[in-house]
């Protein structure tokens, strides 16, 4: 059902959809214009399912003490007020899957109407309208069945959903596909490094462990908070060593990683709780690299923590975009039974 | 005036000084133990002058609308309550200069009693007691004459103050010495890159411009917010191009850097205002690197911003510690008249 196009040209990055404040990009906006009419280079997606960012979902659940009804109401309120699912506390969003409904005449994303896709840009900058009050969601899961539409800008990313995987599985993998791609790139920069992944049994963590091993890590260490996750990770055979420790306790984390064959040359932080920066710094060898993927990372805690510990480590802000990331993550899932098993357990 | 030593061994990173909460490192602590007695590997410094972090000082001035008396009272209150100068809003601190008062028998920092030093670890993790109510400070400058003492831990950093420079000048340089050292390292990784420094006329910015040129940048671009700073930067001859633009306006920043010879292969963000992440991302070429030195950087804004713009850029958290950073920054100041001129203007 095509609707009339907007006549004026938009900006590739979507500033024409920003209602307030003036001059910022959609991600920094308080409120977006969600009109269904497309600017010439835009694409409209009929939404099927949202996948909330883990840190965002956890914050909402904790705020409402697990009351799914209240979580649902707050997600609806955020989307209605902001025109996007942008958690104001965590600053994070998530992504979505759906079907391409209409493609503007000047779009260069290569999408066709009717194609099932996952958006690989954050919900924090994606104009979104929910039309079903999320009646099919009980607020008890990060995955949210939803009816509505979303808009992609000229410069944006969406991946075709694989035919050979259930939609939930594809969505879960694509949601974190930047992590294994960046881990691979960083590990490639070292000769036979020791790689520690904090939160190794999670989605981005298990993919990062698999990527590190495939990229030639001499030893991989999976760090998890509970014995139950340790057992899952051991079953999945994704790490050469699995250690149970609270990553928020810096001295304990350093000790545990050292006992397991560290310090690490590459440390990947994938847990969605605050306060893991000092431990990650202490667990990393001089000349090493830390990749922070968790949206709960504090910039100042990392910067001042490393300085305060006289730690000569490189610290990367985990960029969710690396060329080829979607295909690489899907390939890891398809070819590594351990990764697939962990993902299926979490759905 | 030696005081009795504490008998038990401390931890290299100072956890024995953490009063609350339990188990964290001093930087993450709410409150530190400021007793003057030294653990065996500690050093006590007689304080002469604090240098507040720029983002922290700006926040305090804005909160109190420029009322120096109120700024002074709040700094005193923070230090009294927390046992360290750790701004709870910005999460940042600053550094200090003083004279080594006593060296614990097991200290490995190589300091001698009577030596004038600058501490190169953040005030956010340095136990500090102010004894003169900061009576010599009017709250109108980041540099704070102060009477009192501070403690360095076993694993810490202090640099001997150079004899050939005024103390204020040495302190101002050492405060930001991580920036040029890391800029040099990043620029070294590219062949003849274009380097843009956002906030190029400031302390860390001017040193970063000088470091980039010396490290072989093909072209350096200094970005400043006002024509007055542009004139200063042109006089200093530190950049091949100087552009005036509000770095919080992402499209304007991208345009300005492109006009000046960009996009940049290396972008260094040195301004102490929030909201510069999207513009820095847009101004950087694919495959480029952004170094965030500003304590006003938002982790989620950078991470999600790059993803949302499908920007294949590496983003570094500016680590204030790089081996040799103090000597390198002092050398830049001594040998580059432009850098020295800008610093002297700001004192």
Image (tube, coloured by chain):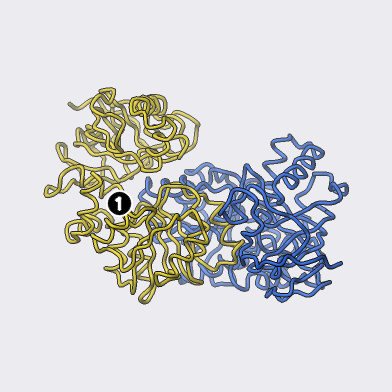
Chain colours: A blue, B yellow
Give the position of the C terminus of chain B as an image quadrant: top left
| Chain assignment, label 1 | B
In the figure, is residue A134 to the left or right of B160? right
The image shows residue A67 at horizontal and vertical percentages of: 79, 36
Q: Nearer the viewer, residue B315 or A147?
A: A147
The reply to whether residue A209 is in sight is no
The image shows residue A140 at horizontal and vertical percentages of: 80, 44
Q: Is residue A251 above or below residue A340?
A: above
Q: Please tell me whether mark 1 sits on a helix, a strand or a loop.
A: helix
Mark 1 closeness class: few <14, some 14–19, many ≥20 residues within 10 Å = many
The image shows residue B265 at horizontal and vertical percentages of: 43, 70
Q: Nearer the viewer, residue B19 or B319?
A: B319
Q: Nearer the viewer, residue B179 or B98?
A: B179
In the figure, is residue B31 to the left or right of B155? right
In the picture, residue B31 is in which quadrant? top left
Give the position of the N terminus of chain B as an image quadrant: top left
Q: Nearer the viewer, residue B86 or B45?
A: B86
The image shows residue B22 at horizontal and vertical percentages of: 50, 32
Q: Is residue A90 above or below residue B89?
A: below
The reply to whether residue B162 is in sight is yes
Query: In this view, which residue lies farthest toward the left?
Result: B164
Q: Residue at x 55, y 53 (%)?
A: B301
Query: In this view, which residue lies farthest toward the front?
Result: A7
Q: Residue at x 69, y 44 (%)?
A: A58
Residue under numbered circle 1: B203
In the picture, residue B312 is in which quadrant? bottom right
Numbered label tally? 1
């Amino acid at each position: 059902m095509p609707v009339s196009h907007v006549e004026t040209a938009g900006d590739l990055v979507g500033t024409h959809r920003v209602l307030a404040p003036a001059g910022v990009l959609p991600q920094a906006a308080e409120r977006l214009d969600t009109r269904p009419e497309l600017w010439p280079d835009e694409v409209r997606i009929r939404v099927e399912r949202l996948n909330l960012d883990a840190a965002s979902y956890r914050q909402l659940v904790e705020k409402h003490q697990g009351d799914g009804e209240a979580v649902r109401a707050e997600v609806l309120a955020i989307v209605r007020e902001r025109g996007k699912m942008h958690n104001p506390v965590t600053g994070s969003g998530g992504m979505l899957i759906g079907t391409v409904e209409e493609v503007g005449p000047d779009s260069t994303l290569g999408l066709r109407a009717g194609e099932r896709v996952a958006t690989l840009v954050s919900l924090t900058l994606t104009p979104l309208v929910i039309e079903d009050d999320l009646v099919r969601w009980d607020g008890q899961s990060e995955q949210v069945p939803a009816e509505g539409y979303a808009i992609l800008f000229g410069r944006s990313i969406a991946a075709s959903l694989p035919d050979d995987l259930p939609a939930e599985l594809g969505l879960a993998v694509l949601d974190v596909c930047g992590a294994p791609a960046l881990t691979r790139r960083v590990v490639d920069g070292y000769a036979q490094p020791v790689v520690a992944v904090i939160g190794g049994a999670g989605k981005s963590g298990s993919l990062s462990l698999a990527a590190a091993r495939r990229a030639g890590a001499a030893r991989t260490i999976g760090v998890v908070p509970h014995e139950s996750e340790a057992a899952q990770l051991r079953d999945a055979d994704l790490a050469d060593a699995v250690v149970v420790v609270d990553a928020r306790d810096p001295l304990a984390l350093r000790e545990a990683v050292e006992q397991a064959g560290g310090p690490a040359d590459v440390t990947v932080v994938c847990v969605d709780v605050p306060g893991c920066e000092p431990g990650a710094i202490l667990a990393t060898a001089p000349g090493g690299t830390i990749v922070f993927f968790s949206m709960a990372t504090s910039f100042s805690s990392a910067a001042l923590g490393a300085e305060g510990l006289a730690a000569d480590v490189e610290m990367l802000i985990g960029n969710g975009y690396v060329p080829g990331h979607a295909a690489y993550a899907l390939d890891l899932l398809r070819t590594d039974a351990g990764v697939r098993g962990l993902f299926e357990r979490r759905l």
